[in-house]
Image (tube, helix red, strand yellow):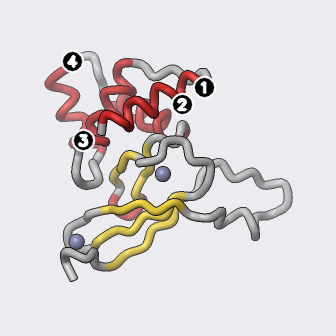
């Protein structure tokens, strides 16, 4: 888990993005969780430690982390997972267990790049696969 924060520092130093204390804290909470985290849960955890963190601030921090490639949004669960390989420039493939909600990330190829419309620039792609993990099978 500390690796994720170190990677984040390194990545942000490289790209010039600013990893503010709140963004760092949000990333830490997402990275520390064993399962996808809902924004709601992040808010309640941050509330206790930082009274100035209003919901919009936390949502903006999440947007920043997603844009920076540090966090992926699991669309169907409306929850967030930390990326184990910060800033990998290609699509994330998430394998979501429908029983325990465990999410495993595998680095994908570049889906979406081959068939994209002319002139379209892909900023990020997340592909979600649903099924049962090895523990639940
Ligand atoms: Zn990733
Ligand atoms: Zn499972």
Q: Position of residue 62 (x, y in %)?
A: 41, 37
Residue located 35% across and 55% down the image: 78
Q: Position of residue 85 (x, y in %)?
A: 47, 47
Q: Quadrant of ligand 2?
A: bottom left
The CA span between labels 4 and 3 is 21 Å
The label on residue 90 is none
The label on residue 11 is 2
* Residue wearing tag 1: 14
Mark 1–mark 3 contact, CB under 8 Å? no
* Residue wearing tag 3: 32
Q: Which mark's residue is nearer the viewer, 1 or 4? A: 1
The CA span between labels 2 and 3 is 19 Å
SS for tag 1? helix
Residue occupying the far left of the picture:
48
* Residue wearing tag 4: 51
The CA span between labels 1 and 2 is 5 Å
Q: Quadrant of the C terminus?
A: bottom left
| Residue 54 as seen in the image, left or right of residue 136 | right
């Amino acid at each position: 888990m500390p690796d994720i924060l170190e990677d984040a520092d390194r990545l942000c130093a490289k790209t010039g993005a600013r990893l503010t204390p709140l963004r760092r804290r949000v990333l830490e909470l997402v990275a520390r969780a064993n399962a996808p985290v809902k924004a709601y849960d992040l808010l309640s955890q941050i509330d206790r430690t930082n009274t100035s963190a209003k919901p919009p601030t936390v949502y903006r921090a999440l947007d920043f982390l997603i844009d920076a490639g540090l966090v992926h949004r699991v669309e169907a669960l409306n929850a967030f997972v930390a990326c184990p390989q910060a800033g990998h420039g290609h699509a994330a493939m998430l394998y979501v267990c429908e029983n325990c909600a465990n999410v495993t990330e595998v680095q994908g190829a570049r889906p979406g790049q081959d068939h994209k419309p002319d002139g379209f620039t892909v900023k990020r792609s997340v592909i979600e696969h649903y099924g049962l993990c090895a523990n639940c099978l």
